[in-house]
Structures are given as structure tokens and as C-alpha cells.
Amino acid sequence: MIQKQAPVTTHKLLRHRDYPGIHQLPRYFEVGGYQTLHQVLGKVPRAEFIEWLAVSKLRGRGGAGQPVAKKWRRMADIPGQRYVIANGDESEPGTFKDRELMEENPHQLIEGVILAAYAVQATKAFIYVRLEYEEAQARVRRAIDDARAAGIVGTDIMGSGVECDIQMFVSGGAYICGEQTALIESIEGKLPIPRPKPPFPTVSGLWGRPTAVQNIETMMAIPLVVTETPEGFAAIGSRNSPGPKVFSMSGHIARPGNYEVPMGTTLRTLIQMAGGIPGGRFKAALTGGAASAFVTEAYLDTPLDFDSLRGVGAEFGTGAIMIFDEHTCMVGAAQSLLRFFRDESCGKCTPCREGTFHMHNWLAMIEDGQGTRRDTDNLARLSGMIPGTTCCALADGACMPVASALKHFMDEFTYHIEHGHCPPGERPVHLPYDDVEGVYHTGDTVGMPPAQHHE
């Protein structure tokens, strides 16, 4: 099949916005799709390809921000079967970028998965899709079938002699399924309960074998290391966290949706791109989704990358940014977040199971006008004690909005305790974590669902 070279594009991950219809294989070929497989498979030694990723400084987009090359090197000296898993179980409030990527550009995902499998010598890969993402499931399944029929998935990929079979797996529908070891447990047919670590999946993962688990966006960035060159990729955006990044903007913002910008872009810039805050001023934001800390106006010009945000006590997470305007009651916002974490805790670890339950109850009492100073003291104590005591990061993430709300908005907690209600002009918000729209509500929906993309 003759493949045409892609023209210059303004998007690298959200390419479908420049080239509609690339979820279909013929169209993806037309814009240069799968060319990287010809360049790499069987021609670039696997260890050398991992070094390309090291030079590119590509870091995982799933939350932890670990350098991809460093992670994959751990698998190098372990003989036998290896696996690759693309994690598309995106189920935290405010996150919806992977949904668009899987629905509209599934072949770039497959291309990245094959390159990852080649690098770590895996012959079997899984694309793990959230239960509620029915359109993404259909598009990914069709893309895999079409790629297999075209000789891109399976044995002797494009005549390279390289083998990689890909299978789609639908999650069990719980937030905890997105944790990499719980995800592995569910693929093995077990309950999605996190495993103690170490050993880490790169040493003992799926069926006890070395397994590379990466976020959907991370997988889709891997072909860009080839097309942009490792040095070119490293020159995009932030020095230590380079590359293009898709940010999901939701909340009190004029145009909620996904926005692709270089890593290191500031929150102020993204708010401007999303049309600003209608009917109010900026009050706070969660920069890494629900499992992150509130930041205030003082941090609007902090570069949005892993190191810069951690330097100010915040988290980058997956790049899900939730905006709260000046009318938001931060006690109510924290309570809504803790209700999500309380309900989604798998219950395995006592600090998480009991801690999220009690923190939500204390926040609810304060919000309902029945709280005391002792409740805020308990919140501060527990949110400082829990992190680092559980098998996975769910409890750590639950503590961050609580601790940061107490740090930045203690006056609102005090007002609730002294007056029994929200401060004048403020209202609570409720996160609809039981749907897939990625926006939250103040009685009515704020903004538009992410299916209406903006940029």
C-alpha cells in the first residue's frame, strides 16, 4: 500500500482536528500514519530506541510523571514473556482527554503501543478502556481489527519480522481499575484490588511477568519521538517535562474541553484559551484532577509541568484542570471531592477505607452548619497522617484537596463553624462523578460537555 507523507499540522496528539476521519485506517494512512513502524521495527535496535526516549525526556502522562525510558530499562534483563498495557480507564472527575484521543485517533494509539512493545520485547499488548466509554470501545476495537487485517497487528508486522498482538479489554467500571496493579488484577480475571509494591509491574506484572503500563496519551506521544526526533521532542515546551500535552479544562470556564499546548504552559494562558471565567473571577483550581491540591491566584503563572507544580505543593496529575470561580464555597467543593473518594475506595487499606469516610463526614458536618473547630483539627491531622500508608495513591490523592483547602481557605471553614452556613455570595459545587461529561454542577451544568471540543 502506498502511503502519503503527512502535511504540516498544528496538532500532534489531537491530529483529528486538522485531519477529520483519521480514526479510519485509509485516512490515517493518507496523513502518514504508521510510518514510524517502517523507520523503527527491525531497523533501530531495541535498546537504542529506549535511548531515543531517554533523550526525548518523555514522561508518563498518567499522573506520576516517571521518565518512560527509566521505567522500561527495568525490564531489560528479565528473560521470557513481557506485556504492554495502555491504560484508558479514565474515571476521575474532570478527566476526559483520553476519551477524545481513543475515539478520534485510535490508530496513533495502536502505533504507540506497537513501538512500546518493540522496545520492551513484548509480543502481547492490551488496550484497557473505561466501561462507560462505549464509543471509544467501538472505535478502538474497529481500529485493532482493521490494523490486523492490514498486517499491522499480529505476526511479521509490515514485513519487519516483529510480532505484537493487541487486544482490547473493558474495565469493571470502578475508579480503582485505573490503578496499574488493580488494572492488572482485573485483566487476570480477579477483583480490581491494588497489589502491594514492590515488586512493581515492570518486574512482576501481568501473570507475574514484566509489564509496561502507560497512559493512553503517553502511548500516543511515542510515535512523536520518532517523527519530531528525540531532540526535537525535548525542545517542545518545558525543559525537564517536554513535549505536547492535552489539558482537560472544566468547571467555571466559558469553553470546557481539551486543549493541546506545550508542556510548561501556564494556567493563566489556558484559562484565556478557554474563554475565561464567565460571570466571576478566578478563585482556585485543581491542576491535576480531583486527586490534587487547590491552587490560588498566586500560582496562575506557574508552568504546568511535573516539577514546577510539585515545587509549589501542587500536582500535575493527568493534566485535568478544574476551575472554581469566586462564588464557590470551598468547604462544599472539598466535601464533594471526598464523597467521590469515599465511594471509590476499594476498602483494602484501613487508612483509606476509614480515612476517606471520616474526612467526608467531618466536611459534611461543617458544610451543614454542625461542625466544630475539633472537626477542622481532625481534618488537618488525618490528611497529614494518611499519605504513604496505603497500597495505592487513592488515599494520598484524597488528602490533597482537604489539606490545601484548609491551608488556603481556613476562613471559610471558620465562617461555617461560627455562622452555620456558607459565606455570603458563595455556593457549593457538586461533581457529577457518576457520569462521563467531565464538568461539575452548581444546580445546573456549568459550561458544555467535552464532546463539544474547543480550541
Image (cartoon, rainbow, N blue to C red):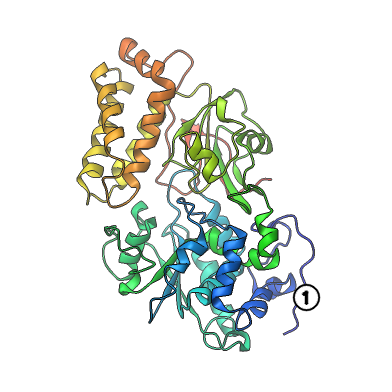
- Residue ID at (43%, 59%): 130
- The quadrant in which the N terminus is found is bottom right
Residue 420 horizontal side relative to residue 221, left or right = left
Q: Is residue 15 visible?
A: no
The percent coordinates of residue 143 (x first, y second) are 57, 73
The percent coordinates of residue 290 (x first, y second) are 43, 40
The percent coordinates of residue 151 (x first, y second) are 59, 85
Residue 381 horizontal side relative to residue 317, left or right = left
The percent coordinates of residue 446 (x first, y second) are 54, 34
Residue 139 sits in quarter? bottom right
Q: Residues within 10 Å of mark 1 (few under 14, many from 20)?
A: few
Does residue 372 lie above or below 83 as drawn? above
Residue 372 horizontal side relative to residue 258, left or right = left
User: Which residue is tagged 1?
Assistant: 4
Question: Which residue in the rendered view is the most extreme toward the right?
Answer: 7
- The quadrant in which the C terminus is found is top right
Q: Is residue 217 visible?
A: yes
Return the residue nearer the eye: 148 or 353.
353
- Residue ID at (50%, 49%): 318
